[in-house]
Image: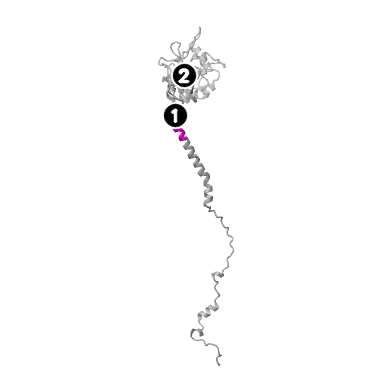
Amino acid sequence: MARQRGTRRPTGREGRFTLGDLRRRTSPRRPHPQDARPTPSKRTIAPDRRTSSAERDRRQIPIRRAIVICIALATMALLGLFALLALSYTSAFTITGVEADASAHMDAATIVRLANVDARSTLLNLDEAAVTERLRKNPWVDGVSYTRVFPDRLRITVRERDVAAIVVMGTGDIAWLLGKGGVWIEPCPLEVGPGQTINEVALAKASELGVLLLTGAPGTVSPVAGHESTDDVIEAVRSYQENFSDELRSQIVSYSIPSVDSIACVLSSGVVVSLGPAANVDAKQSAILRILDEHQHRLTYVNVRNASSPGYRALESDDVQAGSGAVGDGAPSGLAAGQDAQPADAGQEATGT
């Protein structure tokens, strides 16, 4: 066959058919990355939490303002303290007048005299501790407060010590006021009339003041005004009062204290309770309250010196009136204050007349 004119005869590789050509013609065409279509995504896009520097600055403005205010206040306070300190070394605000509020047992003039405020003192450098110490030389003084009235006046207010008990000595017609905290205050003036005993008069005074009565104090008790009591019988009574419940404490009218072993108390019903030393107080209280509950209106005497084996004395009558014990004698009829009676066995009743 004749070759068509104008056509080029393939030569070399151009005229060959290779296996690669067959594969390229028969295999599917691979998609080009640029031909891929993006598939819509259902993923939620998180909001951008990044803030600009301007927004951060706006948020920090209140904090910076608060810091500046605190620094300014601290500076002003410090300057004020320095100013007061400087003025305290000058004659500014020198005290030219001292006033006092009268108390129940101290008039205003006595308070001012005892205070003895230094003429060079000012309202800023007043030595309150020294003035208070001078005022406490009076045993009635328990506390002191000061009011500064600028520019030059000082007012003093005294808080008096509360009375805790009247203590009658065992010998002689002598009684003392004992303050709270066990501090002796001063002798208690009592007028004993014909046919009266000092215990009766002292009980009336104690009832008027709403305080305890302690009778028959031994000779070892030597009160000194303004000094704290260290006597063992007084300490024993304080221990009983601090550890007894309100239920029992509210019934106690007086204590008889001739010695620690013979301490007794008298209830408002007239019942005398022999206590002894201030040991096993809780057990003694339990025994007293149990016996009082079991033998109401019949008891005259209870002995709890031995808390594990308490005893009592009762009348056959169901109505026992308040007797001598109610006026502070501290022992049942026929017994001296603090003297032992023969107690009944625990849980048994002993009758008397």
Q: Of the residues shown, which amino acid type is indicated by label 1?
A: Leu
**Along the line of sight, the residue nearer the viewer: 158 or 271:** 158
**Along the line of sight, the residue nearer the viewer: 338 or 45:** 45
Task: Work out how far the residue at label 1 is from the one at label 2, CA to CA, in angstroms.
Answer: 25 Å
User: Where are the magenta residues, as a range?
Assistant: 77-90
Disc 1 secondary structure class = helix
Name the residue beneath numbered marker 1: 87
The answer to whether residue 270 shows anywhere in this view is no
The residue positioned farthest toward the bottom in the image shown: 1
**Residue 287 location in percent, x, y?**
49, 23
Q: Which mark is residue 112?
A: 2
| Magenta stretch, overall SS | helix
Mark 1 Cα-neighbour bin, 10 Å: few <14, some 14–19, many ≥20: some
Magenta-colored stretch includes residue 278: no
Q: Earlier in the sequence, mark 1 or mark 2?
A: 1
Question: Would you say the residues marked 1 and 2 are in contact, meaning their CB atoms lie under 8 Å apart?
Answer: no
**Residue 279 location in percent, x, y?**
44, 24
Disc 2 secondary structure class = helix
Colour theme: one colour
**Along the line of sight, the residue nearer the viewer: 324 or 70:** 70
Residue at 52 percent across and 80 percent down: it is: 21
**Along the line of sight, the residue nearer the viewer: 203 or 313:** 203
**Residue 154 location in percent, x, y?**
48, 23
